[in-house]
Amino acid sequence: MCGIVGYVGAQPAAPLLLEGLGRLEHRGYDSAGVAAVSGSGLRVHKSAGRVRDLTGTLPKRFAGKVGIGHTRWATHGPASDVNAHPHTDATGRVAVVHNGIIDNAAALRRRLSDDGVDLVSDTDTEVFAHLVGRSAADTLEARVVEALEAVEGTYGLAVVHADFPDRIVVARNGSPLLVGVGEKEMFVASDLAALVRHTTTVAHLDDGELATLTATGFTTFRSDLTRTATEAHEVDIDPAAYSLGLDGEDGAPRMYVEMLEQPAATERVLRGRLDEKFGTAHLGGLNLDARETRAVRRVKILGCGSAYYVGQMGASLIEELARIPADAEAASEFRYRNPVIEPDTLYVAVSQSGETIDTLLAVEEIRRKGGRVVGLVNVVGSAIARACDGGIYLHAGPEIAVASTKALTTMYVGFALLALQLGRVRDLSIADGRRLVAGLRELPAQIEEILKGEDHLAEVAAGLAEAESLFFIGRVRGFPVAREGAQKFKEISYRHAEAYQTSELKHGPLALISPEVPTVALVPDDELTDRNVAALHEIAARGGPLVVVTHPGVDLGDLTARRIDVPRSERELDPILLTIPLQVLAFHAARVLGHDVDKPRNLAKSVTVE
Ligand code: F6R
């Protein structure tokens, strides 16, 4: 979604801002813009469309060594030049970029209009520029604070003002902002990806915090203008991992590159965490000692979209291995049903970006009511990671493609580690623990093996791409896999894909089965295989084409089906191996249909507004 960058230093700001915006492209956006201040005033350049178009049309003389930039994902008003950020006040001396939503924008717009202010855009952000512009306080900091007092909602925002041309003032409430410290230059961004080329010394602002950036440093403060102690620290990331743009080195789509990275990402999430001797996992970051771990009576997992579906897979793992009741719930719904927060429930927030607003707000709701939350998060130092009581970093590496692949795989492995640790302080035997540890060690090679079958999967995908509508079905452990398979398929192929429990087909959806509606069925070799195969016969009898993801040796009898075999694993770990071919199917179906898999329409990488 929307992205922010800012620069103050000795270099011309605009090229640096445009370069930073290019690194935020993967978040999803529909327009972009930059503003810079210098002794001669404020300049703004913005338009609907791509950052590269904006770069191509940047006026030659775009002076200013202090500036802000933005990629916009439309919330208030359509994608248009005028709605693109930065927004300016009536005098054209103030410019603002903003992520988040100003809830009382309509009332503020009315008030400003009544006062004779001419609002030129449809956005909520423009009102903020006018509020700053109308303040007569002595400093830019005090003007921003005064404007914030009128505003309700969420924001990460950055302000420049031609009357204070040496600084950027930024403020955060619910939308991430990071200050990057360079050599006599300072940066601000909503995402680490925009900073890492210049610095890995970073300060994360907290909600309710503001900061002033000048070429020589930054100071942080609260809205009463008292200083806070937020400091910059070195972040432990490999800047090279962010060096790829949207395409891989050889021009391959990022989603493809990231799918292929899954064996390596799986090794990273396991590294140093498995204990063969005791058949368990060590997750020190959870901040739970053995006594606290034993006291957990229930596990509740919260995530959105694909993270929610992996959460459902994780809940099964925890119930099976630790025998603790566990379930997953969409974080976006959780806080609206006034949930009962239990002291002996372990809440788990799962998120790649660590920014998803619904998951973050669910974490805050739980903590406000005294619950304990641990995070399974990929992005180090992200808002969700910092809001939790402890957690596991996923070490998937930067995930740029909108359709999540490698992060989901590491989430699954993270849940397996958590289930092992919870299980081994309870009734999971050492033999079963060791069996699972051995199974987890095998996963990277098994994922590799599935990915090697790409040619066959591409061929199957080409057939599926022809259908306007399709089913993904599975049972028990296989059902969240079906949900994730359908999600990935619809997300990038734009085909209607519906996930269903195989056992429920007869209760309604069988009516939709026809030769035009294929079904992708998950049929692992387990206690339900025979029943699953029987359901497939019912589909075949109605002319429904079948793709069956299964294990070698599973007898499908005389069914006519395209078959995809995945390696046998420990039964509890089947879901992740069943998921991998579904990613590849979705990828190739989208390619056959000519879609840009890395930038699916209407979607953003990190959903930072409700
Ligand atoms: C689907 C996808 C989304 C995310 C969801 C949560 O491929 O990527 O459904 O899983 O938006 O995002 P995170 O994990 O960043 O909280």
Image (cartoon, helix red, strand yellow):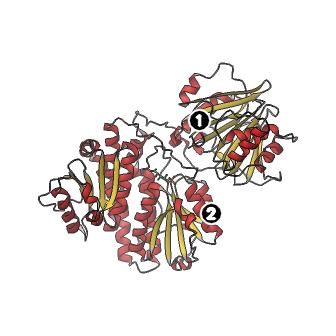
Report the residue that reaches farthest toward the left.
558
- Residue 4: x %, y % from top left: 63, 40
Residue found 39% across the figure and 77% down from its top = 430
Residue found 57% across the figure and 64% down from its top = 335
Q: Residue 92's image quarter?
A: top right
Crowding around mark 2 (Cα neighbors within 10 Å: few <14, some 14 to 19, many 20+) is some
Total numbered badges shown on the rendered structure = 2
- Residue 72: x %, y % from top left: 59, 38
Callout 1: helix, strand or loop? helix
Along the line of sight, which residue is nearer the eye, 113 or 558? 113
Q: Are marks 2 and 1 in contact (CB under 8 Å)?
A: no
Tag 1: amino acid:
Leu
Tag 2: amino acid:
Glu
Residue found 41% across the figure and 37% down from its top = 596
Report the residue that reaches farthest toward the top.
60
- Residue 137: x %, y % from top left: 87, 42
Which residue corresponds to mark 1?
A: 21
Instruction: Describe residue 549's horizontal placement relative to residue 430 as left or right.
Output: left
Along the line of sight, which residue is nearer the eye, 177 or 309? 309
Which residue corresponds to mark 2?
A: 364
- Residue 267: x %, y % from top left: 42, 56
Q: Earlier in the sequence, mark 2 or mark 1?
A: 1
Callout 2: helix, strand or loop? helix
| Label 1 CB less than 8 angstroms from ligand 1 | no
Residue 118 drawn above or below residue 208:
above
